Amino acid sequence: MTELTGLKGIGEKTAGALMRLGISCAEDLIYYFPRDYIAFGHPKEIGGLTPGTTEAVECLLTSDASINRYNGMTIVNLHVSDLTGRLQISWYNMPYIKQTLRAGSCFVFRGRIYEKGGRLIMGQPKIYRPEDYKKGYEGRLMPVYRLSKGISNNLLMKAVASVLRENKPSLLPEEFLPAGILGRIGLKGEAEALRDIHFPRDLKSLTEARKRLSFDELFMFFILQKKRKQLFLKKASEYRCRPDLRFIQLAADLPFELTRDQSEALKTITRDMSSGNIMNRLLEGDVGSGKTIVAFLAMAYAGFCGYQSAMLAPTEVLARQHYDKLTGLIGSRDLPLKAVLLCGSMQKAQKEETLRLIREHEADIIIGTHALFQERVDYDRLGLVVTDEQHRFGVSQREAMKQKGGLPHMLFMSATPIPRTLSMILYGDMDVSVISMRPEGRIPIKNAVVNPSYRENAYKFIYDEVRKGHRAYVVCPSIAEEDEEGSGPSGSFSAGLETVEETYKKLRKLFPGDIGIGMLHGRMKPEDKEAAMQAFKDGQTDILVCTTVVEVGVDVPEATVMMIENAERFGLSQLHQLRGRVGRGHSQSYCIMVNTSDGEEARERLSILRDSNDGFFIASEDLRLRGPGDLFGVRQSGEMGFLLADIYRDRDLLKPAADEAEALLEEDPELMVRDHEGIRKKLSYYMDNSYYV
Ligand code: ADP
Ligand code: MG
């Protein structure tokens, strides 16, 4: 471990800000991979510009820029032309920029191109002196990192570059894969790949770097998976459950009747848990198919048999929702079971008390986030671990839960309908139950893909729905205007995405005061998030403006409208998940996707969603559209906990990685061969890093 403050240009304050991004030492910077790249092309002729893309033009200005005021905004406009066409260039709310743009000067402008009323417009471009552009940018791929307050992209670039250059001793890891594997798969060295993923020389070197590092992740995933299989499968369980009258009564007396698929899944699960062997089962079902109740019943089953169970959720919002529902169910039936909630953000005293309840087995069911294994939790006869939205967790995190008890039964739940061909490989070590039908009485969601000019209508529509007593989500891809790229002479620009804060302000102005509008995003304090979610559930808030924090699991049956801004920015499966937040009650629900791109591809992608509500179909279309060549495509969010690997894009690597892992473990099950030392080290890092208390 090398201290961050030992790096050039990083002081205490910056180190603190980096910590918030999860970067706590110099080595972490190496694995903080860019989320995207900006390609700086050769400046184009105006006639060759395509709407919907970001491109550069080089222009000699024949007149000064002009300034207009419109709706409280100032707009700086510049009209340029060359032999091939004319282009309008506009900047919003940056009046000072006018000084720079004088007739007679020459600049490179790089920005997003769109078309309006037959005119070609470049919006909010960055400005470069032509010689700077040629020397410093043209032909390069610049990394774009995920940022936080106090950390600019430039700063991260410099910090990463200085770590990669550091050679005394090198901070880059030694090669951990045997030469045989590198040769068979055709992979470049690890150190080279790590350099190239941050600062690719060209597209080819980036593609190769990505292949190498994705392979590493998949390979280690399979090593862990096969190890797990060796260790746990068909092992006798210490937590054998027995049918209990109270359980049978509970299952027969639910607020609704279980669907046939739910009953079937439940039957299989209870059979697994009573079989005498350890259960290792995946419960797969599209959004809204009703997985939660099945998990609740499985936990109650364990509880009646005297075992604790734990339910792991990816967000606090979701953990709390499960907790509230479960305590509601327990309370209304006066069940002799106690549930507790354990989250990282809880007050110290409250947390201590919860930990005591768990330790002394006063709590039967423990629901929480990562805190379930990160905190000092002492379980007592932990017989069942349920992981909700399991594709959100890395293998190591899931493994960690297993280490917590003796060897509890494991139930994984996933709403990502992964196509069969992939899930056979990815879940090769699990039994699978599928819920394919939805609860009765659900009306299919109506979908619309619209362009931004439809927004006003959408707001009117939301207004009408709210007046009917329904609620709406408005999802934006970003929280606030933030600086995304490096800087030109005029400072930085935002990428022009809709933001939660701006949308909130706009709606607040637009809607009458008696309509409650709330805000929810990842940068809010946990207690504020909780309050915002609660207000929406209670109906004090009618319209919730939010980021994708609501993507997983959130269940508010009164919500009937899901409006998604910049829908083209999200992956298909992610949009499908978001849409799954509505259509949960008995009223007609709607999903409005605002497409701000003019591109043909975006239109095609979104039309798939518009025309189908079937998650499996959408996943297979996702697979079709996103081939291995899809380098910059929208990524699944955190699929399987991988940093880089993408089960869709890298599907051709899945089988080779699984086969290599299998062969290696067959030849050397304990990884004792000298050549396998690197793999052993990585494995034990996964196994006993801080998750394992
Ligand atoms: P998911 O599978 O996406 O996790 P949930 O478990 O959150 O779905 O269920 C979605 C909604 O459907 C919840 O409001 C739940 O109470 C309700 N629900 C579940 N099963 C049934 C059923 N058999 N009949 C009616 N409603 C149900
Ligand atoms: Mg769910």
Image (cartoon, rainbow, N blue to C red):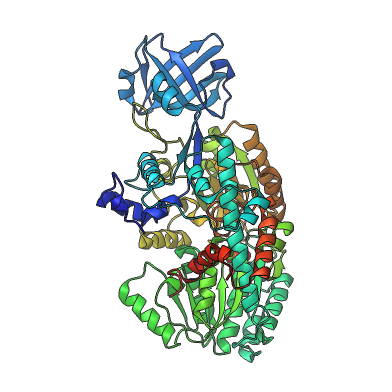
Q: Is residue 677 left or right of residue 626?
A: left
Image quadrant occupied by the N terminus: bottom left
Image quadrant occupied by the C terminus: bottom left
Seen in the picture, residue 147 relative to 115 is either above or below; the reply is: below
Which residue corresponds to the image point at 63% horizontal and 58% vertical from the top-left?
416
- Counting from the top left corner in percent of width and height, residue 147 is at 40, 46
554 and 561: which one is in front?
554
Give the residue at the far front of this rendering: 674
- Counting from the top left corner in percent of width and height, residue 293 is at 61, 73
53 and 513: which one is in front?
53
262 and 370: which one is in front?
370
Which residue corresponds to the image point at 63% horizontal and 88% vertical from the top-left?
241
* Res. 182 in view: yes
Which residue corresponds to the image point at 50% horizontal and 66% vertical from the top-left?
681
Rendered-image quarter of ligand 1:
bottom right
Seen in the picture, residue 223 relative to 149 is either above or below; the reply is: below
Q: Is residue 313 left or right of residue 449?
A: left
- Counting from the top left corner in percent of width and height, residue 524 is at 37, 55
* Res. 568 in view: no
- Counting from the top left corner in percent of width and height, residue 350 is at 34, 76
564 and 526: which one is in front?
526
